[in-house]
Amino acid sequence: MENSFENLLVWQRSMRLAEKIYVLSHANTFDRDWDLRSQMRRAATSVPFNIAEGFEKGTLPDAIKFYYIAKGSAGELRTQCLLAGRIRYLSEDEVKLLSTEATDISRMIMGLIRAYQEREKSKGPSSRS
């Protein structure tokens, strides 16, 4: 396992996705829709935030819990991107790019969850060390 959440590829990719969301949601199309922009930004940042928090919690059950929250936020963000595309705040290409990235990150988080669950089964629920 990694020794720092910053070294996790899934954390790195989710940070880049959050950056993309901030840049794209700064565009004029979002100017009058503060609610959707805010929701998208919160969902986007929730992914790396919860990966980091889960990693730092110190117990496998806590880590897994926060990774599931991150996975849920990736799904929420994907839905928000689809809506932003339908109402023409984002282009079709932007929606495809963002949705694909969020889906890939969600799969990576599931892989991380499975790895931690396997580790929990083999070592018991005591700690991650």
Image: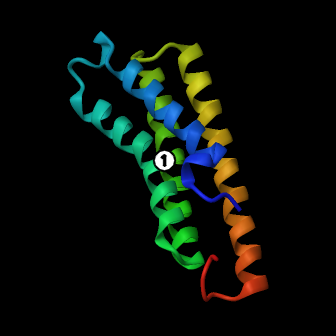
Task: Note whether 24 is above or below 122 in the view shown.
Answer: above
Q: Is residue 12 left or right of residue 81?
A: right
Secondary structure, mark 1, is helix
**Image quadrant where one finds the N terminus:** bottom right
Task: Note whether 30 is above or below 47 in the view shown.
Answer: above
Kindly identify the residue that appears in the image at 29 percent across and 10 percent down.
Answer: 28
Q: Position of residue 13 (x, y in %)?
A: 59, 37
Q: Position of residue 70 (x, y in %)?
A: 51, 54
Could you say which is closer to the camera, residue 88 or residue 126? 126
Could you say which is closer to the camera, residue 96 or residue 120? 120
Count of numbered circles in the view: 1
Q: Check the image and tell me how it is coloured.
A: rainbow
Task: Note whether 24 is above or below 114 in the view shown.
Answer: above
Could you say which is closer to the camera, residue 116 or residue 6? 6
Kindly identify the residue that appears in the image at 29 percent across and 19 percent down.
Answer: 30
Q: Which residue is mark 1?
A: 48
Q: Position of residue 23 (x, y in %)?
A: 39, 20
Q: Quadrant location of residue 98?
A: top right
Q: Quadrant location of residue 63?
A: bottom right
**Image quadrant where one finds the C terminus:** bottom right
Task: Note whether 6 is above or below 80 in the view shown.
Answer: below
Could you say which is closer to the camera, residue 26 or residue 90? 26
Kindly identify the residue that appears in the image at 65 percent across and 31 percent down.
Answer: 100
Q: Residues within 10 Å of mark 1 (few under 14, many from 20)?
A: many
Kindly identify the residue that appears in the image at 31 percent across and 18 percent down.
Answer: 26
Amino acid tagged 1: Pro
